[in-house]
Amino acid sequence: MDKVKKPIKGNIIVGQSGGPTAVINSSLAGVIKASRTAGVKKIYGMHYGIEGFLQEDIIDLDDYFTTSHDLSMLKRTPSAFLGTCRYKLPAIEGNEDVYEKIFQILDKYNIQYFLYNGGNDSMDTIKMLSDYAAMHDKTQKFMGIPKTIDNDLPMTDHCPGYGSSAKYIATSMKEIIRDNESYGVSKPTICIVEIMGRHAGWLTAAAALSKDVDCNGPDLIYLPEVVFDIDNFIERIKELAAVKKSVVVAVSEGLKIKDGRFVCELGSSNDHVDAFGHKQLAGTAAYLANLVKNETGLKSRYIEFSSLQRCAAHLASRTDADEAYNVGYLAAEAAFNGHTGEMITIDVISREPYIEEYDMFDIHEVANVERKVPKAWITNNGTYVSDEYVAYVRPLIMGNLQPYTAAGVPIHMTLKNKKKK
Amino acid sequence: MDKVKKPIKGNIIVGQSGGPTAVINSSLAGVIKASRTAGVKKIYGMHYGIEGFLQEDIIDLDDYFTTSHDLSMLKRTPSAFLGTCRYKLPAIEGNEDVYEKIFQILDKYNIQYFLYNGGNDSMDTIKMLSDYAAMHDKTQKFMGIPKTIDNDLPMTDHCPGYGSSAKYIATSMKEIIRDNESYGVSKPTICIVEIMGRHAGWLTAAAALSKDVDCNGPDLIYLPEVVFDIDNFIERIKELAAVKKSVVVAVSEGLKIKDGRFVCELGSSNDHVDAFGHKQLAGTAAYLANLVKNETGLKSRYIEFSSLQRCAAHLASRTDADEAYNVGYLAAEAAFNGHTGEMITIDVISREPYIEEYDMFDIHEVANVERKVPKAWITNNGTYVSDEYVAYVRPLIMGNLQPYTAAGVPIHMTLKNKKKK
């Protein structure tokens, strides 16, 4: 990656998009620092991503960040500081007015550098805007900053945000196993833990990180990459319950059975409704815990990590936070150097010792593509993950970014409480 | 409290009972340290509480704890190191054989001091055994060590275990609010968070601790001490959604409507079953989130802290861990000094600065009694808690007991991985 050589031509804007992560604001901090270093006059933020930008909802970030303490606090703030959105730009053809509006706003604020921080869907925004700019000889530069707890972006070894979620899952999984082991004289207890990831099992696989000399890890790990067989699952539970008192299972929210239905849809397949006539939808783990209880008579319960796995900044991985900062910083530098229509990627040169490098890739190879867990890393007939996977993920959870705390609770930076002017 | 003056007459045994906490093992560490200091020859543990004890499942703790590092690691291990149980001794009359068996085992191991660490139900064990001992001129001493995340033991200002759970709830609640605030351009998002506490709202009230300059806290807090009015709840949600984009509500799992039914029972009141003919039970928050979606058309989701709120040792409160250690230490000392049929209590002399003292109370005043959140601390027509409550709980969450970590994940002490001989 080259240091900034070209003269800075105008202002910069950065947006956050898609599901938040524990370290998405570290990327924002990287963008701000790189822009300051390069001497950019104005650093703008999109309020609620491209959706807010289209309403000219723009934040002057100079109002918020004046000291290095401000940036340190921003890094320790989970979730999207600028606000996020799930909004996909329409096809260019037939919607030129939308694109013209965007470029009018860019011109109005003299914005030459447009950075967008998100996952597969969000990278589509960079693709569309850089394509439109190329077609219409616009001078603005558009760069993508990778971010997703799902870890499903292609071309990059892994995605910022994933490491911190994996650390949360590993830590919480071990604590849950400890809790579940506490009981034991009477009947076995089956605990089913639901982890995010509709199509890719990267997050669910991270449950294996709880394994060490003090913990055998979950007994079973089910990823959405493998068709889920309910009968086989019940058999495995019975086998385990016959030999041990605590059985803990990690399941992806996206498990599907052979006919293509999600497991979480099965609970409502009889079209049952509540007292008020409302359809009730249970989650995957809730459904399976009920099933275990009914099919085996064993005591069972479920736990859903839900949005905690993407916002638990108090368990952020230092490695992850640093990499998130770096990709933000480097995306800004790349834009200043004239790059456009690309996304920063992370290459891992060595996992032990851990050494990473950064590169960038054509956004057309990234946008809308989902990368799944390799089949070779899924073991035991689809019920566990391999040591190779653990070796892959381990360095990404190393180190802590300790939160700042006040009165016993982490304290964060927000748009409301930090405005300077 | 007196230092140990009487000569030590035999060995000691300690048991853990009921739901685990993040700091229950700190009390165990206190018992071990006090026993070593007093020169007790043998320190035994009950494997799975009184239930295991009745099967003579007894652990020699000298096999595990030889260094101060061992005790430090024990303090940082969540959940019941010895294993726990939910087992209530039968009435003495007609079940003398059970009691005789217990005292035979005590005699066999020359155990003179019997300590039991638990909540209301567990203190019943101390009551029954000390009553039986008094009736039959047994010499053994029986002391209770308070422990419950529910904070519902009487006579003590608060219960060890509660502070760490409150800290987990406060931290996670703030991170969830941050996450929920991320979205905002389009429709409001209602997030309903379910917190433990079937009868007492102490844990749910702790959600208010997330409030500070950077966070308004949850918008509504519903405790089980107040009858839950569904229509009123929906009205409040509509009012909030009209003026803000992120609405977060804390609800106790134990909310009941006017006719006495739990909210979590309502979802199944139409006796609906799944595709396999199984009755499905949703939680309180899941039920209410569904209801909000159906009644208002607003986007809604739910989060359940489930057992994470009692096992997240990585967020343990230092104050809580220290107090848990102290009550364990002092219960052992009290037993050595001849006390029996009592439980150690915590008195708070001053909340600011925080100064606590320890005392003990007749177990008959403690066992099976539940203390609820005072009505005076429940405000806004049953939808929030007062500043007085926050001042009460704040000192209990102060400080951190950092976990030991290895390879990026907390590492714990267990019966399996730490046996010395």
Image (tube, coloured by chain):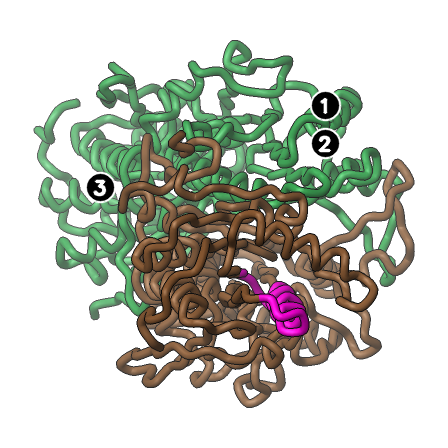
Chain colours: A green, B brown
| Disc 1/disc 2 C-alpha distance (Å) | 25 Å
Residue A255 visible (yes or no): yes
> In the rendered image of this protein, does residue B72 appear above or below residue A369?
below
Q: Residue at x 32, y 85 (%)?
A: B350
- Counting labels gives 3
Residue A54 visible (yes or no): no
**Side (left or right) of B86 relative to B142:** right
Q: Amino acid at mark 1?
A: Glu
Q: Residue at x 38, y 19 (%)?
A: A391
Foreground tag (1 vs 2): 1
Q: Position of residue A240 (x, y in %)?
A: 68, 26
Q: Amino acid at mark 2?
A: Phe
Question: In which quadrant of the rendered image does the C terminus of chain A lie?
Answer: bottom left
Closer-to-camera residue (B258/A191):
A191
> In the rendered image of this protein, does residue A16 appear above or below residue B368?
above
Mark closer to the chain start, 2 or 3: 3
Residue labelled with disc 1: A239
In magenta, the rendered stretch is B116-138
| Disc 2/disc 3 C-alpha distance (Å) | 39 Å
Residue labelled with disc 2: A262
